[in-house]
Amino acid sequence: MIRLVLPCWRTGLVALILCALHGLASCSASAGTKEDVLGELHATLSKTDILCADFVQQRLLKALSRPLVSRGELTFERATGVRWSVKEPFADTMLITETEIFSLGADGSRTPMALGGNAVFRAMAQAILSLLSGDMADLSGAFDISADRDAERWSLGLVPTTPMVLKAISRIGVTGRGYIETMDIIEASGDLTRLEFSGMTSTNCARGQVK
Amino acid sequence: MLGWLAFRVFSAPFVNTNLLSLLPAAELDPAITEVVGKVQKRFERQMVWLVGADDRDSARAAARRAYNRLVASGEFEELYLTHPEAQAQKLPDYFKDLRFSLLTEQAYKQLAQGQAGEFAQDILKRYFSAGSPLTSEIVDVDPLLLLPAYWGTLTANVAAQIESDDGMLTVRDAGKVYVLLTARLKETPFASSMQGRIAPVLEAIAAFVSHDYRGGLFIGAGVLPHAIAGTRRAIDEISTVGVWSVVGIVLLMIFVFRSTVPLVLSIVSISVGVAGGLATCLVLFGQVHLLTLVIGSSLLGISIDYSIHFFCRRFDFGEAWNSAQALRQVLPGISMGLLTSVIGFVGLWLAPFHGMREIAAFSIAGLCFAFGCVVAWYPMAARGMGTLRRDLLLRGLARYRTFWTGNLRRPALLVLLPLVVLGGFGSTRLVAEDNIRLLQAPDQSVIAAEKRTRDLIGRNLSSQFFLVEGVDAADVLRREESLTAQLRDLMHAGRLSGYQAISDFVPSPARQLEVRALLKPQIVGEDGALAKIAPLVGVTDEVRQRYADAFVSQDNQQTVPLTRWLDDAVSGPYRHLWVGGSSQGVMTIVGLKGIFDIAALKDLANRMPQVHFVDPAGQISALFAKYRHQAAWLTLGSYVVVTIILILRYGLFGSLAVLSVPVCAALFSLGCAGLLGEPINLFNVMALLLVLGVGIDYAIFFREMGSDHDSTFLAIALSSVTTMLAFGLLALSTTPAVHSFGLSILIGIIVAFLLAPMAGSRLDLGRRR
């Protein structure tokens, strides 16, 4: 009887150990993933105080048979905020700061945008600002964050915590390889806004753009 | 005693604490005045509160508790915490009905001037613009995006900071969350009895909000907190003035007369006087104003004069005290005194100010009653008193008096001349102030809370507004539209920040038809904007067809009437703009924000028929200035009347001697105001009337008694000290009007007292200006 038990016991122990190790690994993997990803992002982004990129924005509304596509450039300067400059099809420039979103006139004048009911746009702007500045604390205040990564890309899922915003936005999905590359804003109504960033770099950016 | 009486009186419903009700009605068309009055009454009953906390749940819980407490108080006829209609995220049906009737100014101009290309271009821009609220729902209903464009232009006038959060209107600012509570009181906030009931409730709410919730804050905007603070302050001041006057007088009487009998009798006569004054006011006006009581409580300083003169006779009577004879001796003096005081107050009565009339009625009646009490009752009551010996006090006063008798040159040079010179010089430095703030004692904490609330909810409407009249709703809306077109021009020129008008939400029928006519080719036409942009942005044929069909079917129908808006929940925050029917038709209000050029607005109202510019505060300031001038003439008039009476009795030289006392006193009082940098206002001038009355009193007493009775001087000294006490304490008030009044009287009386012996002289050697 002892001879039978021993092999079982050993297999069991090995199995147990293997399970435990696997379990631990997957626990720490999932916990580690979110912290890792956030930490990684924070590290990447906080190294620089300027970022610029080109973007393509597609708005897919259920009521329209084709997406509304606009293109432009953005510049992020840590001291001031994000300058969001749409170039096609119509020129339109905005300035996103911690506290306020401005519309920038051709002469450089800034007017605060009245966005009383437009929760979607405000949430989007805040998310962009937080993601570009690497302020993960700010982000986790406004959203419940889930994170994942595979070999090449990391991805974040942001679900708004404020009920008011939740009524407008169901989820924001962000992916990237170092810096941010795509951002999908899924609205509660089923409409979708997709942003694609290309050529995001911290070098060769024109400074003093953001005033 | 007075304090107790005061407290009893204040809890009575007939005490009116509204300072504005003291003033004469504005000089407008009576129908307009009636409407403005109604509007102000409705406005003053409204309150807005913000319950704030560091997080959303705390703010909501605190707001709910505050709401329950307010409901339990039973003082409100309307109280809103949740706004179910504001919960809907969907486009209100109301705007669906109006989607073919609302066009921005810019779009209107473009279509009217045939610039359809630009019109279409703007629509495209809106599709791609980042900030506009573009959703499937809107595109479905309004593919030309006319509504978002229209809302964009309205945001200057709409409270953009307030959001609807699960039914509660919420404001987020600097990390705090505030929940909005709106309310309307059942009665006017100026009813002191209601104030007494609601003030503890508000304090309790403020206490538990700040105590039980992290970062809890309870602030509000509206007339109620100002009214409560004002009443509290007035009560404090009346108590102070009343109590100290009484204490001072009691001590003085006891010290001088060495017995309590005069004191008791004096109190009786004063009480009779005050009761008589109060009763007269109630009979005549049905109510008594707080300010009347404040000033009236100083009246006891004058009415005690009669008692004092009577009792001072005790010093001169030698062995036999005969109260009836004493009365006979003082009677001419105190009668003349009563007469001139009453003339002084009649001057106040003539002012068309309701408040002044109340004060005049109260004072005249009070003095007459006190006088009557002395004359009728004292001889009997004071029969058994002994005489008093002349003592140090009397001898000192006698010395002072000799300074004035005989050759007048020395006193003239030493006293009169400097007084007159200073007075004259100071008067030239007088600066007038007629602001309505004269009547307000500012309570900083209330003002700060109000400012904070208004900043947070973005509702910074001025107190000035336009009143627009029309035969019916269509007419009044059309008139509003011409007005607002002009207002928009002013806004572009930077002379106005914004406005609020019903026509922004419900265009007049005429305008609706115009807009429809302009839109028709764009929506239905083959070459129209809709046809052009649909393929560019991907509007489906189905949506397009549905939109065009809806337009055609609505085009055949009536325009959207005003009642549709009034009945809909959408109109909630703006319903106050609709005044409703009057004898001439209907009226609406156009609210204003950020006025930088009042003249331009007044001019606008003058140019446009049926449009009136209402400026309550400005009107009151203008009234104050006007009445200040009138009061100055009144004062002069009173002087003339009094001079005539004096001449009749004392001859020319005598009357000059008598008159110089109050004249110099008044002059010096004015001069002091100028030298001290105190601005002169209506209430200073009113005070001068009183100085005339009192100064004449002293001069006449002197003249009547001749220069032999030192006790006369004592009596005058006493009465002036009591008057100084009574009125001088008013100078401590924080309400500028009362303060000016008290200070002018104080200075005037001091000088009148010092100069009074001069009236006794038989030669006219003094210089008079």
Image (tube, coloured by chain):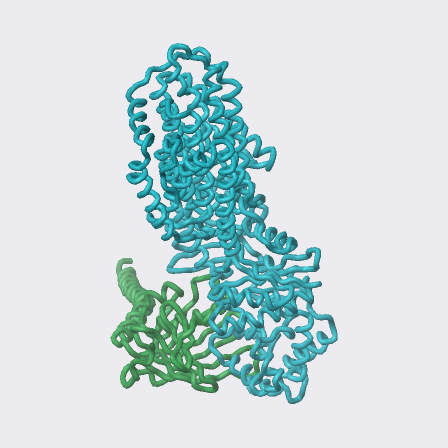
Chain colours: A green, B cyan
Q: Is residue B207 visible?
A: no
| Residue located farthest toward the left when viewing the structure as drawn | A47
x then y, percent, for residue B307: 45, 23
| Left or right of B414 in this view: B476 | right
Most foreground residue, B272 or A181: B272
Most foreground residue, B281 or B35: B281
Q: On the image, which quarter does residue B406 sit in?
A: top left
Screen quadrant of the N terminus of chain A:
bottom left
Screen quadrant of the C terminus of chain A:
bottom left
x then y, percent, for residue B453: 44, 55
x then y, percent, for residue B1: 44, 26
| Left or right of A49 in this view: A166 | right
Q: Is residue A64 visible?
A: yes
x then y, percent, for residue A85: 40, 81
Query: Which residue does the image show at 52% across and 63% down from the upper left?
Result: B592
Query: Which residue does the image show at 60% across and 87% down from the upper left?
Result: B532
Q: On the image, which quarter does residue B468 sit in?
A: bottom right
Query: Which residue does the image show at 45% across and 17% down from the upper left?
Result: B326
The answer to whether B327 is drawn above or below residue A155 in the figure is: above
The answer to whether B325 is drawn above or below residue B273 in the figure is: above
